[in-house]
Image (spheres, grey):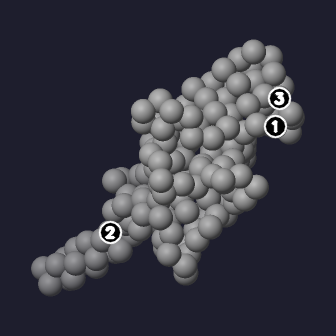
Amino acid sequence: MRLTILFMSIVLMLLGCSSSGYDTLQEAVQSQWDTPIQVLNQDEERQIVIYLDQTQYVAGLYQFDNNKYIYDRESSKGHRSSLEKEYPMFVKPVEFEGAEPFLYGAIVTEEHTVSKFVIHYTNGYTQEIPSKNNTIIAEFPFATQSINDYLEEVDNVIIYDENGEIITSWK
């Protein structure tokens, strides 16, 4: 009987220790960095996260299994906003192995709350993407040729505030 109780105790202890992951996405991502990060946006369906690491916006893939978030910073790509404009901004295509390509972008402004990014392409296609925390995550527009040629196919990016006013544009 004692042996059975001891065995069951060990099994329960090992099961409790094997649950890897974190309760929040913020905790999972932060576990990979020494510097403070801030999760800004996530796409739950495709399990994409955008976070701010000091001055760099980083896109990465996460996992959500057994009500726990798991993040490995090896699956991340970062970008800094162009400082040439009054409101630094970017829109960038990203592709990770084993995942569909996507767009992510951000604008740096504390004066405005961004409602949406509207991307106009040279072929006439327009993509309207709602913003969260002044960032976007969107499907890669297959109306364009390829990820490598993406920026050549962008005619303009216009960023709007919650009142429908233009904050800034690419051109």
Q: Residue at x 58, y 71 (%)?
A: 54
What residue lies at 47% left-to-right and 64% top-to-bottom?
Answer: 38
Image coords of residue 140 (percent x, y): 68, 32
Image height check: is 127 above or below 111? above
Q: Residues within 10 Å of mark 1 (few under 14, many from 20)?
A: some
Which amino acid is tagged 3? Answer: Glu
Residue 106 in view in this figure? yes
Whether residue 76 is visible to the viewer of this picture, yes or no, is no
Q: Earlier in the sequence, mark 2 or mark 1?
A: 2
Residue 17 lies, in percent from the top left, at 35, 74
Q: Between residue 15 and residue 101, name the one nearer to us.
A: 101
Which residue is under mark 1? 151
Q: Amino acid at mark 1?
A: Leu
Q: Which residue is mark 3?
A: 153
Q: Is residue 168 left or right of residue 110?
A: right
Q: Position of residue 24 (x, y in %)?
A: 36, 61
Residue 23's mark? none
Depth check: give the residue in front, 9 or 154.
154
CB within 8 Å, label 3 to label 1: yes
Please tell me whether mark 3 sits on a helix, a strand or a loop. Answer: helix
Residue on which the image places disc 2: 15
Name the quarter where the N terminus is drawn: bottom left
Q: Amino acid at mark 2?
A: Leu
State the image coordinates of residue 81 (x, y, percent, origin top left).
69, 56
Q: Residues within 10 Å of mark 2 (few under 14, many from 20)?
A: few
Depth-wise, is mark 3 or mark 2 nearer the camera? 3
Q: Earlier in the sequence, mark 3 or mark 2?
A: 2
